[in-house]
Image: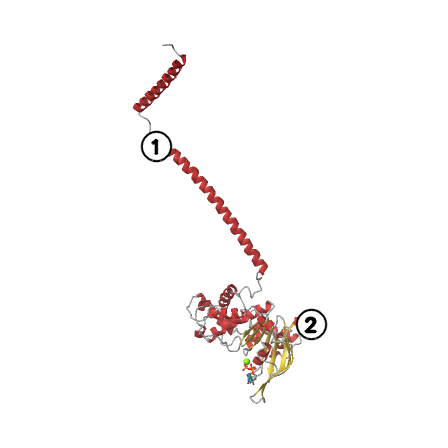
Amino acid sequence: MAEESKEEFVVEAVGLTKIFKDFWNRPKARAVNGLDLKIRKGEVFGLLGPNGSGKSTTMKMILGLLFPTRGELKVFGQEPQNVSIKSRIGYLPEETYLYKYLTAFETLDFYGALFGLDATQRRERSSQLLEMVGLAHAVDRPVGEFSKGMARRIGLAQALVNDPDLVILDEPTSGLDPIGCREVKDVIRLLASRGKTIILCSHLLADVQDVCDRVVVLYGGQIRAQGLLSDILREEDKTQIVTPRLSAETVAELKNFLAAHGVKDLDKVAVDNPGRDLEDYFLEVVRQATEQKVSTAGAHAPGAMPEYLQGKTVPTGQELLQSLKGDAEAEKRKAEAAKAEAQLRAAAEAKEAEKRKALEDLKGAAKPSDAEVKAAVEKAQTEAEAKAREELNKKLAGLNFKK
Ligand SMILES: Nc1ncnc2c1ncn2[C@@H]1O[C@H](COP(=O)(O)OP(=O)(O)OP(=O)(O)O)[C@@H](O)[C@H]1O
Ligand SMILES: [Mg+2]
């Protein structure tokens, strides 16, 4: 395939065929039959079709879990079995297979470890994903206890733990309550807006209609119809106008106006109140229950999407080192400041102690009594007289008198 197509198309299949064989190698089921597919980067692509039409089989071939019997299939320009692309793909299988004794947190931690994420990344991503799918309150519960929808939610979280570029979701909204469905649809649209490619299959056509850019409809393993949803669903021969409520007179005037402008078949002009969306109504009822803090052991309202899935920049090794270095320097500066402060404090304390001691000495030196002063004076006089006498004797001795 051409070099540029590798960039443009995340999945490219030509004549893709899968025939399941029986024990004697006889063809048992022609699950996929000559499929041509081109799925672009950033596209939300829907695989539709009745039961047994080959949707899951196609997904499993894209994942490299099944070998095509015939045809060519490239994923990120590589053979699907190529190990180098595995870390770029997230998969939510039709049935969520979980180790029932692991808790919700351990489950995500386990899958994170399979993708070689370090402990910090696993911890961060697991708690952010559990928050996103509304299971933060159930992190320590074994997943074996989860309801079907809760298991589906943890399955979705597991499919995103490796920050995949291609997300393959087999019936992502099956078993989910309307809040979960809305949440999954929001996550899908957000992921697509971040340049991720999503392939999903679902029998819930309203959900498909809400999220998909393009669909193919399979029947008997072959493409029966395909196209952009915006093209497929647009009714070119009709015009719809939605206005605030109109009075009966205005409606009558409007019909006259249309007739005057050459609109025939006035009986085909429908004027009524558009119906309210049941999904919106349901979400409003639940929003009110949440607001009133009605208790529930089930799934909670979804939290924010993890930053790493939002494409917020993850620090590179260099940036991480730099920030650690920065931290180390800040720590060093802090330690030096603390040391200087301690020295200053010690010096101040020493000075204070000196002052205190001097005061103590002053206080301790008792005021001499009069008698003591007299005695000291007498002592000094005696000493002075003794000294003077001594000096006199010396001088007299020096005169050397004749006896
Ligand atoms: N492992 C298998 N061995 C034999 N036949 C299989 C196998 N997997 C699928 N098939 C057959 O291939 C055909 C397509 O099955 P597939 O699971 O792809 O359908 P699907 O479109 O996903 O259906 P559903 O909407 O029920 O999930 C079916 O006839 C099915 O019986
Ligand atoms: Mg299926």
Up the image or down, 37 lies above or below 341; here it is below
- Horizontal and vertical percent position of residue 4: 69, 71
- Horizontal and vertical percent position of residue 291: 45, 65
Q: Residue at x 41, y 38 (%)?
A: 353
Ligand 1 closer than 8 Å to the CB at disc 2? no
Q: Residue pushed farthest front? A: 403
Q: Nearer the viewer, mark 2 or mark 1?
A: 1
Q: Quadrant of the C terminus?
A: top left
Q: Which mark is residue 402?
A: none
Q: Amino acid at mark 1?
A: Gly
Q: Which residue is mark 2?
A: 3
- Horizontal and vertical percent position of residue 84: 60, 71
Q: Is residue 362 visible?
A: yes
The image quadrant that residue 39 belongs to is bottom right
* Comes first in the chain, label 2 or label 1: 2
Q: Which residue is mark 1?
A: 364
Q: Is residue 245 visible?
A: no
Q: Residue pushed farthest right? A: 2
Q: Ligand 1 is located in which of the four quadrants?
A: bottom right
- Horizontal and vertical percent position of residue 400: 40, 12
Q: Quadrant of the N terminus?
A: bottom right
Up the image or down, 387 lies above or below 273; here it is above
Q: Residue pushed farthest top? A: 402
Q: Amino acid at mark 2?
A: Glu
Q: Is residue 238 left or right of residue 207?
A: right
Task: Determine whether the residue tagged by mark 2 lies in a helix, strand or loop.
Answer: helix
User: Few, some or many C-alpha atoms within 10 Å of disc 2 (few <14, some 14-19, many ≥20)?
Assistant: few
Nearest the camera: 184 or 276?
184
- Estimate the spatial distance between the alpha carbons at disc 2 and disc 1, rounded to whole Å: 99 Å
